[in-house]
Image: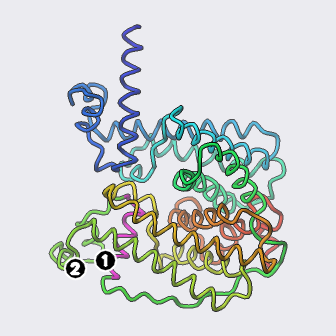
Amino acid sequence: MTAESKYNLRKEAIVRVATDLLNRRGLDGMTIALVAAELELAPRAVGYYFRRKEDLAVACYTRSIARMDEHISTALEEGTASEALVSFVNSFFDAQRRVRQGELEPIAWFEDMRTLRDPGAGEAFTDLFRKVRSLFKLTGAPSLQHRESNARAHLLLSQMFWAVLWLPRYNPEDYTRMASRTAEILLNGIAQARDDWPPPSLGSIPESESSHAFLVACTELINEQGYLGASVAKISARLKVTKGAFYHHNETKDELVEQCFERTWNILKLAQARADEVAKDGLMNLASQVMEMVGGQVSGQRPLLRTSALAAVPEDMRPRLLAGFDRITARYASVLSDGLEDGSVRPVDVATAAQVISGAINAAAELQYWAPGLTPKTAGDFYVRPVFAGLLSPAADTRQVK
């Protein structure tokens, strides 16, 4: 083996271990010393390849972006938009199957990439997004405004990242089936054909937490800058209070983050209860909830904490936090079943459709980065409606909105 081959193998091993640590501990918990310990190396040996842990993290993210780029590049070789979408989903889900079976290394979560502010990684991710967006210009895609195609590209790409969370609930041999069901829902939506859009408003949903301001500021900063970016100093500065005032209300940042998750669940549960009161059928029940939750995030009036923050919380906290989102998603599946019974929802796998809904709400926190200037109304037309009508369905064309 040549010296160059040895160098490349060692470097790849370092990136592989660092990716695993990023996913388990976040950027804060991924250190040169821990990577070295995993490989039974001295820290200086890792430092020979990567001088700083930030440089190593960028290598992890860049490799993961390249992997995602392979999936979409192959998909774009298909003849039509629908064929490309199915190919993209199938390719990504198959890669996750191979990861689960130990045949392929996992990709890194992108939670802390924004914290690094690395121009190269940022541009690579933007190029990936543009490729996903180009799918909506292939034969068979509806004619879309620029922000419409951006919103749908964000929705499609985010559904792949969301699937990383829920696919492990299934056996690896079922991943092909789940890919087929996910692609079918993304293509054709959830709703039976109808023209009563938009859904009924849920009205005001009050919040009553005593530390509401701290929770909102922490949620906004984590969504904007990642877990590391949401420092105590930045949270305090956003609220124009001292760090002493922060610790008067909160013992630790981790405790505050846990409360942010609790706040997010409470808002989602309040929306579910209100939708039960105002909606006439299962479809409008769900559509009202998604409109409210997406609109509140786009307007900035009701930020929700993204699940990507789980990458940085202590590992022993994650199962309980994930269970909270599981309960919310299970409720969506239950309402989808109601919709099947009353005829408002077309025949779909309700468990998969519920995950698509949860993923869409979760990803709305970043919608303004990719489709700036959206209002709750236009976000409903450009982003929410395609969830229910299908990403490539003529019924999702905003020119058809009544």
Q: CA distance from mark 1 to mark 2?
A: 8 Å
Vertical arrangement, residue 395 with respect to residue 149, above or below: below
* Left or right relative to 53: residue 370: right
* Badge 2: residue crowd in 10 Å (few <14, some 14–19, many ≥20): few
In percent of width and height, residue 9 lies at: 40, 21
Q: Residue at x 82, y 45 (%)?
A: 80
The label nearer to you, 1 versus 2, is 2
* Badge 1: residue crowd in 10 Å (few <14, some 14–19, many ≥20): many
Vertical arrangement, residue 296 with respect to residue 222, above or below: below
Q: Residue at x 74, y 47 (%)?
A: 86
Q: To which residue does mark 2 refer?
A: 249
In percent of width and height, residue 97 lies at: 59, 41
Vertical arrangement, residue 335 with respect to residue 156, above or below: below
Q: Residue furthest left?
A: 244
Residue 238 among those drawn in magenta: no
Q: Residue at x 78, y 61 (%)?
A: 188
**Dominant secondary structure, magenta:** helix
In percent of width and height, residue 89 lies at: 67, 47
Q: Are marks 1 and 2 in contact (CB under 8 Å)?
A: yes
Q: Quadrant of the C terminus?
A: bottom right
Query: In the rendered structure, which disc, 1 or 2, sits on the residue that comes first in sequence?
Result: 1
Q: Nearer the viewer, residue 398 or 173?
A: 173
Residue 214 among those drawn in magenta: yes
* Left or right relative to 141: residue 289: left
Q: Quadrant of the N terminus?
A: top left
In the image, which disc is placed on residue 124? Answer: none
Q: Amino acid at mark 2?
A: His
Circle 2: element type: helix
In the image, which disc is placed on residue 214? Answer: 1
Question: What residue span does the magenta drawing correspond to?
Answer: 212-226
* Left or right relative to 147: residue 10: left
